[in-house]
């Protein structure tokens, strides 16, 4: 990847600028993840509380079983949906944290491949 120290040094041109840009993007992505997690926790708690209130009011065993199975189904669907959202948010976090270094590494390797093709 790097042939000498100058290649390595040029890889980190303006490291402070690169770090601050990446840090601010990463921070905003982490805040979005935290907000989403907080909202999901609040919704889950509220749905659980509401379900418990309904469950305590039920007089019949069959109704209780139906209510419980509907709640479990709904909770599972919410969980799967939220997991997908978290996966997307974490993927965006990784993409925003690495493109600067990734593009420089790709550029270096393409320059090296071009130079080696001229030597042949």
Image: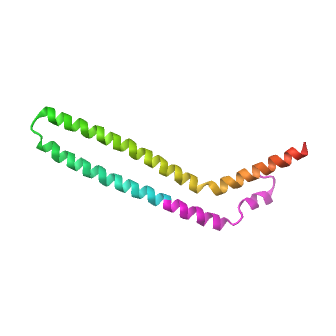
* The quadrant where residue 37 appears: bottom left
Q: Residue at x 11, y 44 (%)?
A: 57
How many discs mark residues in the rendered view? 0
Image coordinates of residue 105 in percent, x first then y, are: 71, 52
Q: Residue at x 16, y 42 (%)?
A: 55
* The quadrant where residue 59 appears: top left
Image coordinates of residue 50 in percent, x first then y, are: 21, 49
Question: Of helix, strand and loop, which mostly describes the magenta segment?
Answer: helix
Q: Quadrant of the C terminus?
A: top right
Numbered range of the magenta stretch: 1-28
Image coordinates of residue 19 in percent, x first then y, are: 61, 64
Q: Residue at x 29, y 37 (%)?
A: 73
Is residue 1 visible to the viewer in this orientation of the structure? no
- State the residue lying farthest toward the left: 59
**Is residue 69 found left or right of 19 in the rendered image?**
left
**Is residue 106 found left or right of 58 in the rendered image?**
right
**Is residue 104 found left or right of 65 in the rendered image?**
right
In front: 40, or 3? 40
- State the residue lying farthest toward the right: 120
Image coordinates of residue 35 in percent, x first then y, are: 40, 58
Q: Residue at x 25, y 48 (%)?
A: 47
Is residue 107 visible to the viewer in this orientation of the structure? yes
Task: Tell whether position 70 is magenta.
Answer: no
How was the colour assigned to the protein in this rendering?
A: rainbow
Q: Is residue 58 above or below residue 38?
A: above
């Amino acid at each position: 990847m790097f042939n000498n120290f100058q290649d390595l040094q040029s890889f980190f041109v303006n490291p402070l600028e690169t770090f601050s840009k990446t840090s601010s993007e990463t921070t905003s992505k982490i805040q979005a993840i935290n907000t989403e997690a907080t909202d999901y926790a609040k919704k889950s708690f509220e749905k659980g509380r509401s379900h418990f209130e309904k469950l305590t009011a039920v007089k019949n065993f069959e109704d209780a079983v139906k209510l419980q199975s509907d709640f479990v189904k709904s909770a599972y669907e919410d969980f799967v949906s939220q997991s997908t959202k978290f996966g997307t948010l974490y993927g965006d976090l990784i993409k925003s944290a690495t493109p600067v270094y990734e593009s420089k590494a790709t550029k270096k390797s393409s320059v090296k491949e071009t130079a080696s093709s001229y030597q042949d």
